[in-house]
Amino acid sequence: MIDYAAAEGVARITLNRPEKRNALSGRMVALLRETLQRAAGDATVRLVLVRAAGKDFCAGLDLGEVLQTEDSGGAETSARNLADLYLGMRRHPKPIVAEVQGRALGGGAGLATACDLILATESAQFGYPEVNLGFIPAIVTTMLRRAVGERVAFELVVGAEPIGAEQARSVGLINRVYPDSEFESSVDRYVVSLAKKSATAMSMSKSLLYQMDQMSFEAGLEAGVEANTRARQSEDFKRGVERFLRKS
């Protein structure tokens, strides 16, 4: 269900359930959390890439399992496990990049949105169709609103219509769009290049950025002062300055 491989500073986590369009079962959510923790503890890993086998990134939650969960009274547990996955991704010490091809719908769009960066093919589609089923994309809403703003998020959630990659990029939902024929090679170049940057600086930048969600302007500046001071004391910064001075 979940494959893991690490090379060149990149941990590649692959959803491998293509016969179900990589629909998220409870087992897959648990395995994702485990593999993300594995990547967090691997000193050779500087960046995590979440990708999928088959034509689609992820069609959302496994609806058959969802109905069984409802019957057994485990709805809150299922929802809590998904929320814990997203929270773990937010708090993960390393950047997490989503590689999206085909459709990312419902919980699949949520999984992509929970990543720090999203790279997509031109033909990719993103959507939150839960309202069409009498349901809501409740857990991902907090991240979606931060990514695209209130009005765009409202239309995506209530309209429940999928949008293409270029539109998703234009509203701020995703970062980059690549031609389908060049997608894998383009993503590989991007993540390998990013993984060459300072692991300390990337980790501190991610932590500071997300801490500011609940801060006032003044508190944000103070957090920046503290992070600036710690960054100056890191070995990565000292080596980076030495390299710069040697070149100049």
Image: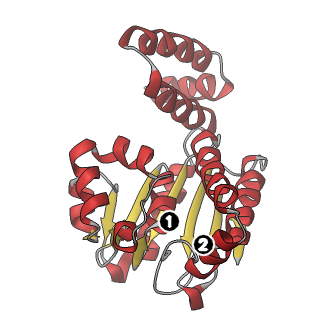
Q: Which mark is residue 244?
A: none
Query: Which residue is rendered at x = 35% and y = 83% of the image?
Result: 181
User: 38 left or right of 183?
Assistant: right
Question: What's the distance in space between the residues labelled 2 and 1, CA to CA?
Answer: 7 Å
Picture layout, residue 152 above or below residue 54: above
| Percent position of residue 231, x then y | 58, 20
Quick check: can you spot residue 164?
Answer: yes
As displayed, is residue 207 above or below residue 34?
above
Q: Earlier in the sequence, mark 2 or mark 1?
A: 2
Q: Position of residue 223 (x, y in %)?
A: 51, 14
Please state the horizontal and vertical placement of residue 184, each as a whole percent of the image. 46, 75
Residue in view at x 60 percent, y 76 percent = 67
Q: Are marks 2 and 1 in contact (CB under 8 Å)?
A: yes
Q: Which mark is residue 24?
A: 2
* Depth check, front residue: 140 or 187: 140
Res 49 → quadrant: bottom right
For residue 200, what is the image quadrant? top right
SS state under label 1: helix
Quadrant in which residue 137 is drawn:
bottom left
Instruction: Please give the name of the residue rendered at 39% of the width and 69% of the height, measured from the top-left corner.
Output: 134
Out of 93 and 8, give the one closest to the viewer: 93
Residue underneath mark 1: 107
Which is more toward the observer, 118 or 106? 106
Q: Amino acid at mark 1?
A: Gly
